[in-house]
Image: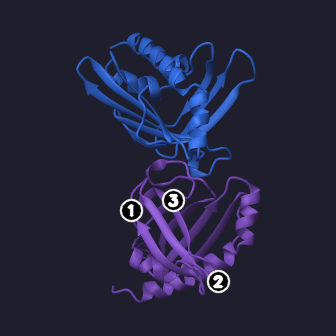
Chain colours: A blue, B purple
Amino acid sequence: MKADPHELDLVLTRIVPVPRRLVWLAWTRPEHLVKWFTPAPWRTLEAEIDLRPGGIFRTVMQGPEGPPMDNAGCYLEVVENERLVFTDALLPGWRPAPNPFFTAMLALEAVEGGTRYTARAMHKDSADREKHAAMGFADGWGKALDQLVEVARGMPD
Amino acid sequence: MKADPHELDLVLTRIVPVPRRLVWLAWTRPEHLVKWFTPAPWRTLEAEIDLRPGGIFRTVMQGPEGPPMDNAGCYLEVVENERLVFTDALLPGWRPAPNPFFTAMLALEAVEGGTRYTARAMHKDSADREKHAAMGFADGWGKALDQLVEVARGMPD
C-alpha cells in the first residue's frame, strides 16, 4: 500500500509473480473471480460480467455474518490484458446508480518476473476515501490479491 | 415530447429538417453549442468538449438572474453522427461526481426530410425524473432544439 499523491484515491501497487494474461483472466471470468475477489472469510457467491463499456459488473458477496450484499455497476474501459475500469456510480446501460461510492482502475504491466499490478479506487471526496480506508481497503484488496495469485497459479498455461 | 415506457426517463423525439451531420456538429463543437444549448433568455457562456469516452463535457450557463452555473461531466459513448452519451455522474477521468443527476443519450437517425432526433435523460429514481420534468425538461430541451435547428441552418454545407 503506497500513499497516493491524489488525496481522493486509494492505491494498491505490487509486483505479482504471475503473467498479466492470467491476472486479466482472473478479473474478467466469473468462474475465476468468485474464487479470489473477497478476502476470506468473506465469500463471493456470484459474479456477472459483460466485458464492454456500459456492460454489467455485478458481484454478490457475503460475510461470515449478515445477508448477501449485491453490488452492481458497469465497466467504463476494457483494454485486454492492460487496463480495466469500472464504477458503481453508473448501472449497466449508463443509468446513474442510487448509491455511488467509487470507480476502480486496474492497470497491468508486464515486468521482469511477473506483473506490476496497480489498483486505484477513486472517490468523490475525502470523506468517502476515509470511509473506504476504514473499511479496510489496503488489507482487503491486498489479501484478495494474494488469493488472485493462488488462483492464477492454478490456471492451465 | 412523448411519454416513455421507462418511468425513470424523460424523452424528447422529433424529426428536424436538417442533416444529421449538422446536428452532430452542433452538439460537438463548442462554438456551435454555445449558440443553442440553453433556451433563451438563458445563455451558455462557455463550453468545453473533449470528445472521447471519459473526456470532459462542461458548460457554464446563466439565467437572466443569478450567478453562472458550472456543470462538468464526461462522455460515455461517442459514435460520430449517430450516438452521443454523457453523464454528470462521473467527472472527466471517471471520478464519481459530487452531485449526480442524469445521463443523457442522444440518438440521430437519417430519415426522409432530415434527422430523427431522440434525446433521453436517464435518472436514478422517479424523484429525480419528476424534478427534471418540473425544471422544464420538455419545454427547455424542445426550445433548445429549435435553436439548434436555426444554428444548423446557418452552417456552411
Residue where numbered disc 3 is placed? B73
The structure residue drawn at horizontal position 45% and vertical position 86%, both measured from the top left corner, is B151
Q: Is residue B3 visible?
A: no
Task: Provide the chain ID for the residue under circle 3.
Answer: B
Task: Provide the chain ID for the residue under circle 1.
Answer: B
Check if mark 3 and mark 1 are on a common chain: yes
The structure residue drawn at horizontal position 73% and vertical position 54%, both measured from the top left corner, is B125
| Image quarter (top left, top right, bottom left or bottom right) of the C terminus of chain B | bottom left
Q: Helix or strand or loop: what does disc 3 sit on?
A: strand
- Give the distance between the C-alpha atoms of the residues marked 1 and 2, in whole angstroms: 29 Å
Q: Earlier in the sequence, mark 2 or mark 3?
A: 2
Please name the amino acid that badge 3 sits on.
Gly
Q: Helix or strand or loop: what does disc 2 sit on?
A: loop
The structure residue drawn at horizontal position 70% and vertical position 63%, both measured from the top left corner, is B4
Q: Residues within 10 Å of mark 2 (few under 14, many from 20)?
A: few
Q: Is residue A140 left or right of residue B9?
A: left
Q: Tell me the mark number nearer the camera, choosing from 2 and 3.
A: 2
Residue where numbered disc 1 is placed? B50
Query: Which circle marks residue B65 in the picture?
Result: 2
Q: Earlier in the sequence, mark 3 or mark 1?
A: 1
Q: Is residue A9 left or right of residue B122?
A: left
| Image quarter (top left, top right, bottom left or bottom right) of the N terminus of chain B | bottom right
Q: Is residue A59 visible?
A: yes
